[in-house]
Image (cartoon, coloured by chain):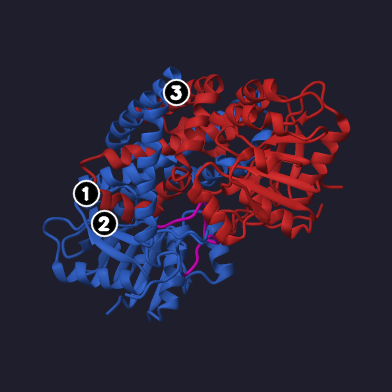
Chain colours: A blue, B red
């Protein structure tokens, strides 16, 4: 059982992929979309993204059974305030942001009684952004974390889980605080580090830009892919998941300094032991089907 | 014009890929191989890697026109001492190590008069290692840096460049000091950071291993691929390129702390500007043909 009418607020990589995945799944119904930028709305109309592209968020959510907040996390509270008076009783509102604690405290106060707010985080993406970046298989075999509030309506949560399964994703429930810590480790800090490394290379006058680019295949290239992600989205992630980010950065620099010391003192045993240990994690990821040796991003659909 | 007899000392990812690439290119002649481990030699014989697999390095280099040192950089001096008495006059000796300054000072003293020592660094690889990891297209459209000594024989260098071109690579000459700095930026530091990040995740008791693995697609996965590289090779790289590594680590942590401070103080403008700047580098890499949007590692061969 799905949602007859869906509203997508924000038409970037995630929302557009949700639209194409809904269409692929044959989820019947009507999808209305809204984006703040007129250019984005125009693009959406041109490529057939959404059944209707509306000129206001209020218009898009009118009558919707599912409302998806897919904007950068920094503006979700503002969007929630704007749509609140227009939400249908019994509707489900979700967000798809990468941070949950701040989003919950920003959005929840605006949600009217009789509307279910169930935060979500589909852990999938590419370094591309915008309405043309989406594709129907983005969520296949990826995890969508669901962070239901303590008093959530169980039927509404289960309906939402079925919806994500139909889009290709696996789901897992988690509390907001743990979510923000896990994501700091597996996503936010790796992104910050990749941005930093690319910034250092760019800044370095003794190594030309041309050299950095030509010789990137030696390891640096993987960092640039991550560091090409949407700047607005990531600015908001770091500003809203500040505590977990700063805590994990402390751990990271502590470890990095220990390895730096081993290099300085010539402690080859420590380096070798460290580098051997990290191989095991890679094996675990391959076994869990979250990547493959073939560079296809592990997106192959598995049987459920 | 190529080399009638080639000796590969060390039979890992690079040497085995060189063998398959020579065979693909129809480079006639005889290739002898040697590896210190009996198990590796056995594997090489089983999979048909090299025309002859020898039980000593001395035997492998006897009569060779090109000798390739493809061991971890930490043992290259020792290997050079071992093979020196057996080198044919007029032969070319190359290494394929990731560090040049230390290798040159370790290997050069052992090279007899009348033998050309021309250090090389094919900047290509995968996270896999060992004799079975090689494949014929590894060097296609990748850069091989050539670091000829000041008194190098120009004809010998040009012959070597033609050889690398036949294997699919582009070549560029560079001096040893600049090589080690460039590689610290585009390769060594990214690897150290990836190892560190994966180590932090593995260590973190509040986030289970299972969670790190399940949710890796959110950015962390790219780090684990890099951090699965051969521990011995990388230990030696850091121990032998100590100065450039430590200098670049200093730059990296300086930048990281600046971004951490921006997060702590809520300076969204600084973060957004930084993240926007790093996107341009990625565009440059795509334009230079060193990666593609399609996740095929950018290995497609371009016309020369």
Label 3 is found on which chain of the structure? A
Residue that mark 2 sits on: A119
Q: CA distance from mark 2 to mark 3?
A: 44 Å
Q: Quadrant of the rendered structure where residue B65 is?
A: top right
Q: CA distance from mark 1 to mark 3?
A: 39 Å
Q: Quadrant of the rendered structure where residue B75 is?
A: top right
Are the residues flagged by discs 1 and 3 from a single subunit? yes
The residue shown at (40%, 54%) is B217
Task: Work out whether residue B89 or residue B156 is closer to the camera in this orientation and state it.
Answer: B89
Dot 3: what SS?
helix
Label 2 is found on which chain of the structure? A
- Point out the image quarter for the N terminus of chain A: bottom left
Residues at marks 2 and 1 touching, judged by CB atoms closer than 8 Å: yes
Q: How many marks?
A: 3
Dot 2: what SS?
loop
The residue shown at (53%, 60%) is A133
Task: Work out whether residue B203 or residue A222 is closer to the camera in this orientation and state it.
Answer: B203
Residue that mark 3 sits on: A263
Residue that mark 1 sits on: A176
Nearer-N-terminus badge (2/1):
2
Residue A126 magenta-drawn?
yes
Badge 2: residue crowd in 10 Å (few <14, some 14–19, many ≥20): many
Measured from the top left, where is residue B81 in percent x and y?
63, 27
């Amino acid at each position: 059982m799905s949602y007859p009418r869906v509203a997508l607020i924000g038409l970037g990589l995630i929302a557009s992929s949700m639209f194409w995945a809904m269409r692929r799944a044959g989820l019947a119904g009507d999808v209305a979309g809204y984006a703040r930028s007129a250019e984005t709305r125009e693009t959406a109309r041109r490529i057939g993204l959404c059944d209707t592209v509306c000129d206001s968020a209020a218009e898009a959510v009118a009558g919707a059974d599912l409302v998806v907040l897919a904007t950068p996390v920094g503006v979700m509270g503002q969007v929630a305030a704007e749509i609140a008076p227009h939400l249908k009783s019994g509707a489900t509102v979700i967000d798809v942001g990468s941070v949950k604690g701040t989003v919950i405290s920003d959005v929840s106060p605006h949600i009217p009684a009789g509307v279910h707010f169930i935060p979500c985080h589909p852990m999938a993406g590419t370094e591309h952004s915008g309405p043309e970046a989406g594709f129907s298989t983005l969520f296949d075999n990826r995890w969508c974390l669901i962070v239901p509030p303590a008093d959530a309506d169980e039927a509404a949560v289960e309906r939402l889980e079925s919806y994500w399964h139909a889009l290709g994703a696996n789901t897992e429930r988690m509390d907001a605080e743990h979510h923000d810590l896990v994501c700091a480790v597996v996503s936010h800090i790796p992104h910050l580090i990749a941005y930093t490394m690319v910034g250092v290379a760019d800044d370095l006058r003794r190594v030309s830009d041309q050299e950095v680019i030509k010789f990137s295949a030696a390891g640096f290239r993987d960092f640039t892919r991550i560091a090409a992600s949407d700047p607005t989205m990531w600015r908001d992630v770091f500003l809203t998941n500040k505590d977990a980010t700063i805590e994990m950065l402390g751990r990271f620099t502590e470890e990095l300094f220990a390895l730096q010391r081993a290099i300085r003192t010539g402690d080859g045993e420590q380096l070798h032991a460290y580098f051997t240990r990290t191989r095991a994690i890679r094996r675990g990821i391959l076994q869990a089907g979250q990547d493959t040796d073939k560079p296809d991003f592990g997106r192959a659909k598995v049987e459920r």
